[in-house]
Amino acid sequence: MNFEIIGPITDIESVAMGNTDEAKRVRKKYGERDWNKFTGNAMIRLQNGRIRKAEIHWYESDGAGPKEFKRKRYLD
C-alpha cells in the first residue's frame, strides 16, 4: 500500500466476490473464511505527503479485519 488512510472511510458498499479466481486467491492467502470485497471513499496521504480524496477497495472477513487496501481513483 503506497498511501495512508487518514480519517474515516465513508460510503462503504459491499461488492460480491462469488467463486472467482480473486476469491480463491484471497482465501488461499488469508485463510478459509467468508471474505467480502468492499469499496468506500476516504482521505489518503500519499508517499509524497499530498492528501487526496480517493475511492478505495479492500477485502474483509469477520475476525480477520481488512486486508489489501487499493486506491482505485481520485475523487477530487
Image (tube, rainbow, N blue to C red):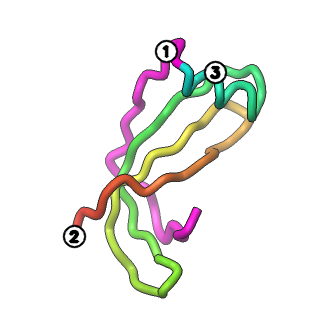
Q: Quadrant of residue 14?
A: top left
Say if mark 2 contacts mark 1, CB within 8 Å: no
Which is more toward the observer, 47 or 38? 47
Distance Cα–Cα, label 1 vs label 3: 9 Å
- The kind of residue tagged 3 is Lys
| Residue lying at 58% horizontally and 23% vertically, measured from the top left | 23
Residue holding disc 1: 18
For residue 59, above or below residue 36: below
Q: Position of residue 45 (x, y in %)?
A: 47, 76
User: Magenta residues?
Assistant: 1-20
Residue identified by numbered label 2? 76
Q: Of the two numbered discs 1 and 3 on the same chain, state the one appearing first in sequence.
A: 1
Mark 2–mark 1 distance (CA, rounded to whole Å): 32 Å
Q: For this view, does 71 lie left or right of residue 30?
A: left
At which x and y percent is residue 50? 40, 84
The percent coordinates of residue 76 (x first, y second) are: 22, 70
Tag 3's secondary structure? helix
Label 1 environment density (alpha carbons within 10 Å; few <14, some 14–19, many ≥20): few
* Residue beneath the point at 61% across and 26% down: 35
Q: Is residue 23 above or below residue 59?
A: above
Q: Residues within 10 Å of mark 3 (few under 14, many from 20)?
A: some
The residue at which mark 3 appears reads as 24
